[in-house]
Amino acid sequence: MRRQFDDELADLDNGFTEMGMLVSDVTQRAVDAFINHDRQSAQAIIDHDHDINEREIQLEAKSFEIIALYQPVTMDLREVVTILKAVSDLERAGDHARNIAIATIAVKGNTRVAEIEAQIAEMGHLTTKMVQSAIQAYVDKDAEAAKALVTFDNQLQEHQKVITDASYQQIIQNPDVLKAATNYNIVAGDLLRIADYMTNVGEWIIYLKTGKIVELKFLN
Amino acid sequence: MATILTSRDVHVYYGNHEALKGISLDFEEKGITALIGPSGSSKSTYLRTLNRMNDMIPGVTVTGNIAFQGNDIYAPQTDLVALRKQIGMVFQQPNPFPFSVYDNVAFGLRIAGQKNREALDAVVENALRQAAVWDEVKDHLHDSALALSGGQQQRVCIARVLAVSPKIILLDEPTSALDPISSSQIESTLLQLRKDYTIITVTHNLQQASRIADRTAFFMNGEVVEVDDTKKIFMNPAKKETEDYISGRFG
């Protein structure tokens, strides 16, 4: 029996997937802009950050409305709760992509270190891949794929450590790179935060499928 | 917690039609169990077997075993009046007798031979307090119970059951004829009573089950599909049929 609720939930589900794709796209563009020193593209990301914030508010309002009007239980409730919680994680991930864009603008015109930027490019691509995997795991409602997200997170922590160490080394050797190197640190930190939020999304997907609230980082 | 009521492989037949297909459920002392399920799932039939209300319906056959405090309630020597004092029933439609509030609540005790006015006064007041209707009716004890609102009548009916000191209270959709405020008062009353009585209630109101029941049993087609803690049933049931019913996919 198809219920009115199923249509409402499908709308909410589509809205969440769209927002996920938006965040995936903005992460990709923020990484590219940083690597390519593309100030214009970075500015566009900053200017459009509110799009993601507005989507979060819309999806939250829709979730509250569904809870009030349909009083969902069991799997239905978990689907709504998953979106309600994970939508904040997506929004925060979007904020960190915006921070990368801000760093792109801040670094422009300063002395840079090609070697570290290559490492950031690698970390950025891996982060983008993780965001895409998280959204795909949500679309497929795939708890195993959600669990696998934590391996991205582990790799990204390694990347961040390498970038941070290299940045400090470069500052010691050549104080002219201070501005750029500080921002390399910031960007690596932002990428790692995005990974954290995607891990959270993974945890909510597991909740959706199993009803269990888990900490993925402590699961393995 | 001690088990107060057990049922084993209970079948009920209306003529040739098998309405209950082997129910085995146990009930512990105190707490609320909700019986839910679609219309025709025979949850009310099951409820009525627990104090032999089905006996009055011609052509009904009950098999299996139901024991109250270890004694088979279908044994030939069972005293039906005594049984129904221990296991009382509240029905869907409030059904006060066409007497005063006081006489309604005192009815069971008078039948049992209690004539002492002071003793009766005390029991009537206590029962009406337990049923959370005392404050509303204390100045109208000798007015007709039929003059009360539906919700008040239902609570007087609960008081009438309580007055004979039952161990178990059976309720068959006790709020389905009441407005939301009266229903909510009955729910609060039941939540108070669950501390002292074993309450088994049939309800079509799933939210009511989730609000008040400690345990919920899901009936379908004369069988118990699943019985578990209410939280488990409403958040993560084990059976797909339960999930589908609870979330309104059928029923």
Image (cartoon, grey):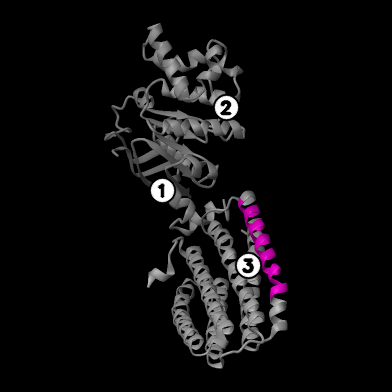
Magenta-highlighted stretch: main secondary structure?
Answer: helix
**Is residue A212 visible from the viewing direction of this image?**
yes
Report the chain holding disc 1: B
Mark 2 residue element: helix
Amino acid carrying mark 3 in the image:
Phe
**Residue at which label 2 appears:** B151
Residue pointed to by mark 3: A16
Specify whether residue A61 is painted magenta: yes
| Labelled disc at residue A50 | none
B46 relative to A100 in the view: left or right: left
Q: Is residue A88 left or right of residue A38?
A: left
As drawn, A73 above or below B197: below
Q: Nearer the viewer, mark 3 or mark 1?
A: 3
The residue lying at 61 percent from left, 23 percent from top is B149
Q: Is residue B178 visible?
A: no
Q: Quadrant of the N terminus of chain B?
A: top left
Q: Secondary structure at mark 1?
A: strand
Q: Are marks 3 and 1 on the same chain?
A: no
Chain assignment, label 2 = B
Residue depicted at 48% across the width and 59% down the height: B240
The relative height of residue B164 versus residue B240 in the rendered view (above or below) is above
* Foreground of the two, B222 or B69: B69
Mark 3 Cα within 10 Å, few/some/many (few <14, many 20+)?
A: many
* Residue A218 percent across, percent down from the top left: 39, 69
Which contiguous range is marked in magenta? Answer: A46-67
Identify which amino acid the numbered label 2 is placed on: Gly
- Give the Cα distance between marks 1 and 2: 28 Å
For the residues labelled 3 and 2, say whether their Cβ atoms are less than 8 Å apart: no
Where residue B20 sits in the image (x, y, percent)?
Answer: 43, 45
Seen from the viewer's position, the closer of residues A40 and B16 is A40
